[in-house]
């Protein structure tokens, strides 16, 4: 694995930002989450999901808005799957799938960059902290999938529960956004330790100024795996250039 957290496999640096007026994050919509996963895992089905299918209206991708990077981004995050660094919280697998906005086909080798606060609402690497917990980068596989072993995020004053995300491709940032959670999942987390020490968030999705700017199209799908672990999944589409 590339040990340089600021470069991709071809040696290109992962730039911090790019003008976003020309770039859109998208979510594959016509399948629904389950249908899209089935199509991506089935080569025969995938053959019908190319440009011709898009042109014929059989497959559609819906724009999801770019959202603010926020004040807590840190350059040089580590390329790794496990980002907890021992921080307590509800174990969660974050599954992010990146697809081509023009064809809805998966993109291999995109760098997905995530960061979020811990159960106490604290971010690493800012305000004098030198830690790296709950930050990391993963490359997408042939299915466009990048996964992170993390915890359910906490909250801090004035913001709903969220995870920040960027997608880097060819050395450029092609999507910057935030991922959100269904209210039922947030409420359930608030009742568990150590989240219960702080109670429920003071700001919910509908009251969050950033969420109101299209956040409903950046909601993760929250399920449980066979072991009972929380799994949060989302599909993001990007323009390659």
Image (cartoon, rainbow, N blue to C red):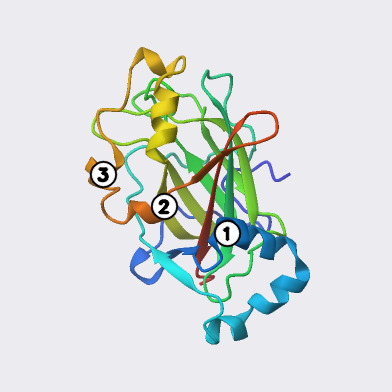
Q: Is residue 118 visible?
A: no
The secondary element bearing badge 1 is classed as strand
Q: Is residue 69 visible?
A: yes
Residue 39 location, x and y as percent? 68, 65
Q: Is residue 117 above or below residue 167?
A: above
Residue 98's tag is: 1
The residues bearing labels 3 and 1 have C-alpha atoms spaced at a distance of 26 Å
Q: Mark 1, residues whose alpha carbon is within 10 Å: few (<14), some, or many (≥20)? A: many
**Rendering quarter of residue 183:** top left
Q: Tell me which label, 3 or 2, sits earlier in the chain.
A: 3
User: How many numbered markers are drawn?
Assistant: 3
Residue 239 location, x and y as percent? 50, 70
Viewer-nearest of discs 1 and 2: 2
Q: Tell me which label, 1 or 2, sits earlier in the chain.
A: 1
Nearest the camera: 26 or 23?
26
Residue at 35 percent of width and 60 percent of height: 65
Quadrant of the image containing the N terminus:
top right
Q: Mark 2, residues whose alpha carbon is within 10 Å: few (<14), some, or many (≥20)? A: many
The residues bearing labels 3 and 2 have C-alpha atoms spaced at a distance of 13 Å
Residue 181 location, x and y as percent? 42, 41
Classify residue 233 as left or right of residue 164.
Answer: right
Residue located beneath label 3 in the image: 206
Residue 196 location, x and y as percent? 39, 15
Q: Tell me which label, 3 or 1, sits earlier in the chain.
A: 1
Q: Is residue 68 above or below residue 100?
A: above
Residue located beneath label 2 in the image: 218
The residues bearing labels 1 and 2 have C-alpha atoms spaced at a distance of 13 Å
């Amino acid at each position: 694995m590339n040990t340089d957290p600021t470069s991709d496999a071809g040696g290109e640096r992962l730039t911090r930002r790019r003008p976003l007026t020309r770039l859109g994050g998208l979510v594959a919509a016509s399948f629904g989450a389950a249908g899209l996963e089935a199509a991506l895992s089935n080569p025969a089905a995938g053959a019908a999901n190319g440009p011709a299918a898009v042109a014929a209206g059989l497959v559609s991708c819906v724009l999801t808005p770019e959202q603010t990077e926020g004040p807590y981004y840190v350059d040089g995050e580590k390329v790794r799957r496990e980002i907890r660094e021992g921080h307590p919280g509800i174990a969660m697998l974050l599954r992010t799938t990146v697809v081509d906005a023009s064809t809805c086909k998966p993109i291999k080798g995109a760098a997905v960059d995530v960061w979020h606060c811990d159960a106490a609402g604290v971010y690493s690497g800012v305000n004098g902290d030198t830690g790296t917990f709950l930050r990391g980068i993963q490359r997408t596989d042939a299915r466009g999938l990048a996964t992170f072993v993390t915890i359910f995020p906490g909250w801090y004053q004035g913001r709903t529960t969220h995870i920040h995300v960027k997608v880097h491709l060819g050395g450029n940032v092609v999507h910057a956004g935030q991922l959100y959670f269904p209210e039922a999942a947030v409420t359930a987390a608030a009742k568990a330790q150590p989240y219960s020490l702080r109670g429920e968030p003071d700001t919910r999705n509908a009251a969050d100024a950033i969420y109101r700017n299209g956040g409903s199209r950046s909601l993760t799908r929250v399920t449980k795996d066979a072991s009972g672990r929380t799994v949060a999944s989302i599909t993001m589409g990007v323009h390659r250039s």
